[in-house]
């Protein structure tokens, strides 16, 4: 007797199809009965080839688990799957092909006209910018199938390519993967696409942005955002219940990430209105030379009755770099992507073990300062010698230039640097420089980046003109920022360390840093030595009638004050912690900051 193979119901359900009859021959895996439960269908197939001896159910019957459905007298033969299964596979392949075709409509290869327009301007496409940030094969894209909310006024098939991804690429990729630990390389990426409706922000565009920012907040991913675009989009007609659009969450959400995850923005071309608001709210702003950034574009300016202006008259990059809107100015988008990756590197933790760490000959620091204490020098020469080779990145180079701010690596560890620049105002701290330094202190504090201060300042910039700029209010913020520092801070006094300005630069006083050191050339005082002598000994100097004798007395008093304020003397009364050989600066910083 041939064996009997019984097929049983695997779950509760209703029989919606019986595909075999008694005495019918069936093949292995041939469909026989279909059961439906919760709108899902399960097909019971023959477990062996042979002849159907009995069918226990008919259409409409209710099945219980384990209920017999069909008996087969097996013949032991084995056969391939039936045509019905192949047809199912054919359906799945069709859907897969449709998916691939749809996704391709968002890529440059299917958007040749838009790509050519970008290249004719000397610009890159959004997806080319993406390729310059991270490996594409590791990029997880969100919302690729989105189109502009304009189905009511435009052909849907046209929207799929013309408004690809609704004008913004969003996703998660690995940035600097070869340089930092794998777990630190994940980053959220947002790239506005100017080839889609001039990069304007539509309904689904904002939903995608909000989704990406929520992911960044939850996963603690840093964000790199390319912000090119013309602001809000008035042409999205599908969303008929929105009147003002002021309920949009994107701007508040983006701003709320401050201090939680690092945010780097990149501008190229026109960046107006909402796009500019996103750009300006980032922690580090990078822009190309061919950038125009403004809180309103030409249409909004004209609509407000403020005249007709060309877009190239609004916030050109040369001006925005000088007023501090742009932190780092680069030549083009390719350089912008490289700079964004370099800046992000300072927030991704230490470089990988085994990373080659080279640095300059430290003995050159013994010769960097001029013999005459009145002469200027370039403090960047000191920064570049102390830091790991090619690791220094300056922030806001053209704004508040009396102080230099930026990041370096020390033995592969990220460190923030604030340095007096005696080439500008003799290193006196004006309101722009003070504001820049306090903002940088906040940034390092928020992301636990240790700080080095290289001090050579005669103090705060003074005078009626300076007070007209709100010096009292704005410069005081440097004390506030310093008082909130909990990250390691090491102060190195290179030369001048005078007055309130020096105190503020050191975090509040010479005891505020975790380690305060000086080079032998360091000099300290409540105010500049020359001013202290002229003010403190005004009466004595006035009593000397002979000009030659008065000059001699002045020089004598100045020498005495200089001697009292020399680094070694100040260290002898414990107002600073140590005086070091300049050539030992790098070694000392590594020990004091990194242990």
Image (tube, rainbow, N blue to C red):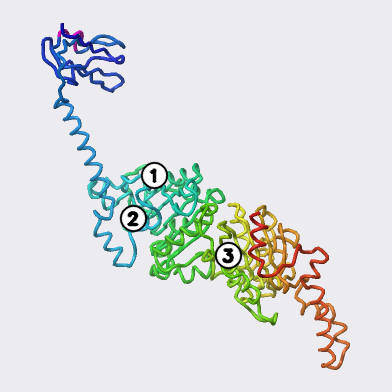
* Residue count near mark 1 (Cα–Cα under 10 Å), binned few <14, some 14–19, many ≥20: few
- The residue at the far top in this view is 1
- Using the rendered image of the protein, determine whether residue 543 is visible from the camera's viewpoint: yes
First of labels 1, 2 by sequence position: 2
Whether the magenta-drawn stretch holds residue 559 is answered as no
Determine which residue is flagged by label 2.
127
Quadrant that contains the N terminus = top left
* Residue count near mark 3 (Cα–Cα under 10 Å), binned few <14, some 14–19, many ≥20: many
Residue at (42% x, 60% y) in the render? 337
* Residue count near mark 2 (Cα–Cα under 10 Å), binned few <14, some 14–19, many ≥20: some
| Residue 121, x across and y down, in percent | 32, 67
Helix, strand, or loop for circle 3?
loop
Between disc 1 and disc 2, the foreground one is: 2
Disc 3 to disc 1, C-alpha distance: 54 Å
Disc number placed over residue 242 in the picture, else none:
1
Determine which residue is flagged by label 3.
387
Callout 2–callout 3 Cβ contact below 8 Å: no
- Residue 161, compared with residue 540, is above or below; it is above
Residue at (43% x, 50% y) in the render? 174
């Amino acid at each position: 007797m041939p064996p009997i193979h019984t097929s049983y119901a695997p779950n509760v359900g209703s029989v919606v199809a019986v595909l075999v009859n008694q005495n019918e021959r069936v093949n292995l895996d041939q469909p026989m009965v279909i059961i439906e439960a919760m709108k899902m269908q399960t097909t019971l197939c023959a477990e062996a080839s042979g002849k159907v001896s009995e069918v226990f159910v008919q259409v409409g019957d209710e099945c219980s688990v384990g209920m017999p459905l069909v008996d087969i007298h097996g013949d032991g033969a084995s056969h391939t799957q039936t045509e019905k299964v192949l047809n199912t596979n054919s359906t799945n392949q069709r859907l897969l092909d449709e998916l691939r075709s749809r996704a391709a409509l968002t890529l440059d290869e299917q958007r040749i006209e838009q790509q050519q327009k970008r290249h004719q301007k000397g610009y890159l496409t959004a997806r080319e910018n993406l390729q310059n940030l991270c490996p594409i094969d590791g990029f997880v894209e969100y919302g690729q199938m989105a189109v502009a909310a304009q189905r009511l006024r435009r052909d849907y098939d046209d929207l799929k390519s013309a408004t690809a991804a609704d004008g913004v690429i969003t996703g998660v990729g690995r940035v600097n993967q070869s340089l930092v630990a794998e777990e630190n390389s994940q980053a959220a990426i947002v790239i506005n696409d100017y080839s889609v409706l001039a990069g304007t922000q539509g309904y689904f565009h904002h939903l995608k942005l909000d989704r990406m920012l929520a992911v960044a907040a939850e996963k603690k991913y840093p964000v790199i955002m390319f912000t090119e675009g013309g602001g809000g989009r008035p042409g999205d007609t599908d969303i008929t219940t929105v009147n003002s659009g002021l309920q949009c969450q994107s701007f508040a959400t983006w701003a709320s990430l401050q201090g939680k995850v690092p945010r780097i923005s990149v501008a190229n071309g026109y960046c107006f209105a909402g796009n500019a608001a996103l750009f300006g709210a980032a922690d580090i702003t990078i822009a190309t030379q061919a950038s125009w950034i403004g809180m309103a574009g030409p249409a909004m300016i004209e609509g407000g009755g403020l005249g007709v202006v060309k877009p190239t008259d609004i916030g050109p990059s040369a001006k925005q770099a000088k007023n501090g809107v742009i932190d780092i100015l680069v030549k083009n988008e390719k350089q912008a992507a490289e700079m964004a990756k370099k800046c992000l590197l300072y927030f991704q933790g230490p470089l990988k073990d085994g990373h080659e760490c080279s640095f300059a000959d430290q003995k050159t620091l013994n010769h960097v300062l001029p013999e005459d204490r009145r002469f200027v020098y370039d403090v960047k020469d000191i920064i570049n010698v102390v830091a790991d080779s090619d690791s220094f990145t300056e922030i806001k180079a053209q704004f508040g230039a009396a102080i230099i701010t930026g990041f370096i690596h020390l033995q592969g560890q990220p460190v923030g640097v604030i340095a007096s620049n005696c080439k500008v105002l003799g290193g006196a701290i004006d309101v722009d420089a003070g504001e820049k330094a306090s903002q940088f202190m906040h940034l390092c504090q928020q992301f636990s980046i240790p700080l080095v201060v290289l001090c050579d300042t005669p103090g705060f910039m003074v005078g009626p003109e300076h007070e007209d700029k709100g010096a009292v209010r704005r410069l005081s913020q440097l004390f506030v920022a310093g008082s909130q520092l909990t990250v390691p801070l090491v102060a190195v006094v290179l030369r001048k360390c005078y007055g309130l300005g020096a105190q503020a630069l050191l975090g509040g006083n010479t005891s505020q840093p975790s380690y305060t050191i000086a080079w032998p050339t360091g000099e300290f005082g409540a105010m500049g030595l020359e001013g202290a002598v002229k003010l403190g000994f005004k009466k004595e100097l006035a009593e000397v009638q002979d000009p030659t004798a008065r000059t001699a007395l002045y020089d004598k008093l100045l020498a005495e004050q200089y001697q009292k304020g020399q680094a070694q003397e100040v260290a002898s009364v414990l107002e600073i912690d140590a005086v070091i050989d300049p050539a030992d600066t790098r070694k000392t910083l590594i020990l004091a900051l990194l242990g």
